[in-house]
Amino acid sequence: MAQDLKARTKTFAIDCGRLCRNFPHSREYNAYVNQLIRCSSSVGANYRASQRGKSTADFINKLKIVEEEADESHFFIEIWLELYDLDNEKCKK
């Protein structure tokens, strides 16, 4: 299970990076691109860190960070879908 989530969180960060590659370079796009790349890659990095938790409390705290960063990633994807009339089905892939 841990290996599966490790792979899935890495894939999520890569998929978000590939999505961001498709946007033009402009001030408004760059702000969202930078935020999504930061929070989506943080999901995987913090999940990996949770696996090295020093205690149960440390493990739970790190997983809470993973949850927050995943929610933030979801927020920026929702913003893009609405602001830029993106195809929701394409983003789901």
Image (spheres, grey):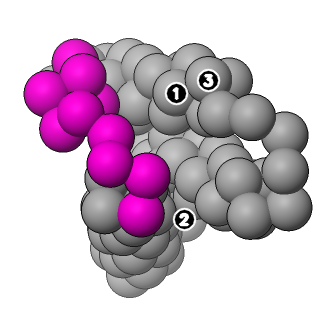
N-term-proximal mark, 2 vs 3: 3
Q: Residue at x 75, y 34 (%)?
A: 24
- Residue 7, horizontal then vertical, whole percent: 38, 18
N-term-proximal mark, 2 vs 1: 1
Q: Is residue 37 magenta?
A: no
Mark 2 in CB contact with mark 1 (< 8 angstroms): no
Q: Which label sits on residue 2?
A: none
**In the picture, residue 2 is in which quadrant?**
top left
Q: Residue at x 23, y 33 (%)?
A: 87
What residue is pinned by disc 1? 19
Label 3 sits on a secondary structure element that is loop
Mark 1 in CB contact with mark 3 (< 8 angstroms): yes
Q: Amino acid at mark 1?
A: Leu
- Residue 11, horizontal then vertical, whole percent: 42, 20
In the rendered structure, which segment of residues is drawn in magenta? Answer: 83-93
Q: Amino acid at mark 2?
A: Lys
| Placement of 22 over or under 55, stated as above or below | above
- What quarter of the picture does the C terminus occupy? top left
Question: Of tags 1 and 3, which is closer to the observer?
Answer: 3
What residue is pinned by disc 3? 22
Question: Of tags 2 and 3, which is closer to the observer?
Answer: 3
Distance of label 1 from label 3 (alpha carbons): 6 Å
What residue is pinned by disc 2? 54
Q: Is residue 63 visible?
A: no
Label 2 sits on a secondary structure element that is loop
Distance of label 2 from label 1 (alpha carbons): 35 Å
